[in-house]
Image: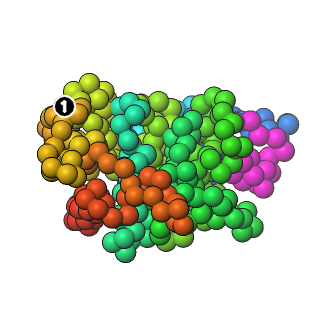
Amino acid sequence: MLTIKEVEELLGELKDPILNVPLKETEGIKEVKIKEEKSHISVKIAIGRMGGQEQLDLQTKVVNILKENGAETVGIRFEELDDDLIEQHRGSAGSETENNISDGNTEFIAIASGKGGVGKSTVSVNLAVSLAKQGKKVGIIDADIYGFSVPDMMGIVEKPGVDGEKIIPVERYGVKVISMAFFVEENTPVIWRGPMLGKMLTSFFNEVEWGELDYLLLDLPPGTGDIALDVHQMLPHSKEIIVTTPHPTAAFVAARAGSMALHTKHEILGVIENMSYFESENTGQKEYIFGTGGGEKLALDLEVPLLGQLPLGQPEWDQDDFAPSIYKKGKISEVYEEIAERIISETNEK
């Protein structure tokens, strides 16, 4: 039968699934008890975040390794590491989720907003397409699981493929796409609680065959709820872009999303102001329908650059290549391409 020291040595080599650091380095093996007469081992393990598929996977690994080494039964209790230990080890290695997708060359960028209705998803899909136009390999996860809209915006009608146990994302305009929309019936509401949503999000990362990517964009739900927190914890190296309108209230609420990113030690690449103005095609006169200054003030408050200001305007629709929210040409398309170029420049410098 194993000794306590041997159990600690065996389990200490397993990695914390959130921090991607061996449990022996995080001091994650909190307690080991052995009942030799019953060949039973019970352990208490602390990890970076409770719940989700990562905890279940680690649980399976612990049970298997102990049974392979003589235990007949295994009991496991989990708890979360202290905040100071999480911060100490966060970023010392890519998380398991990051490493499943990336060889270290993928930039993860979350697109966030404080409230709905500011055009965050429109910005997400057009930014993804613009990055692809620059020759980059791009993927996008529609992480707005209650309000998924990316496939409709991009005019995607087909479903993902399957290769063995892997899901093959749909590709359009050079962008690989995965969304909850592919897995529910049309117009069916998603009535799930947080843990189920977190499990679906984990599947988007771990069960999709992304291939090589330069950029993986995540269209987050508005606000600072469970999904946004899950993304921040799964992807400790992700960066963030905050979307707002010029209206002072929208910018004020968006500051909360920015504060969450800073609180979780995530870099904010900058602010994008959407619906900045309407410009008449006939006169060239600009009308500031939602006011002015919101994006500039938000960028100033967060001490980040204002990446761009997008005017109001409807994309030109092509019935033969229908994508109702993609700006393929014109002034707005040019602004997106300028923002994409700036993001490439910023991320290549780091």
Q: Is residue 122 above or below residue 49?
A: below
Q: Residue 291 location in percent, x, y?
A: 19, 31
Q: Residue 162, image x and y in percent? A: 72, 65
Q: What residue lies at 28% left-to-right and 41% top-to-bottom?
A: 275
User: What x and y, as percent, mark residue 294?
Assistant: 19, 34
Instruction: Name the residue at 40% across, 68% down.
Output: 132
Task: Return the residue nearer the eye: 33 or 274.
Answer: 274
- For label 1, the residue is 291
Q: Is residue 188 left or right of residue 37?
A: left
Count of numbered tags: 1
Instruction: Please indicate, yes or no, whether residue 23 appears anywhere in the rendered image.
Output: no
Residue 211 in the image: above or below residue 289: below
In which quadrant will I find the C terminus? bottom left
Horizontally, is 13 left or right of 267 in the view?
A: right
Label 1 residue SS: loop
Residue 217 quadrant? bottom left
Q: Is residue 75 left or right of residue 257?
A: right
Q: Residue furthest front?
A: 282
Q: Which residue sits at x=75%, y=67%?
A: 164
Query: What stretch of residues is rendered in magenta?
Result: 58-77
Image position, residue 61 (x, y; %) = 69, 51
For image coordinates 53% across by 45% down, the residue present is 149
Q: Quadrant of residue 252?
A: top left
Query: Looking at the image, which is closer to me, 153 or 81?
Result: 153
Does 85 lie within the magenta span? no
Local packing at callout 1 (Cα closer than 10 Å; few below 14, some 14-19, many 20+) is some
When the figure is inspected, residue 230 is found, relative to residue 164, above or below; the finding is above
What amino acid type should be assigned to the residue bearing mark 1? Gly
Residue lying furthest bottom: 135
Any part of residue 173 in sight: yes
| Location of residue 195 by image quarter | top right
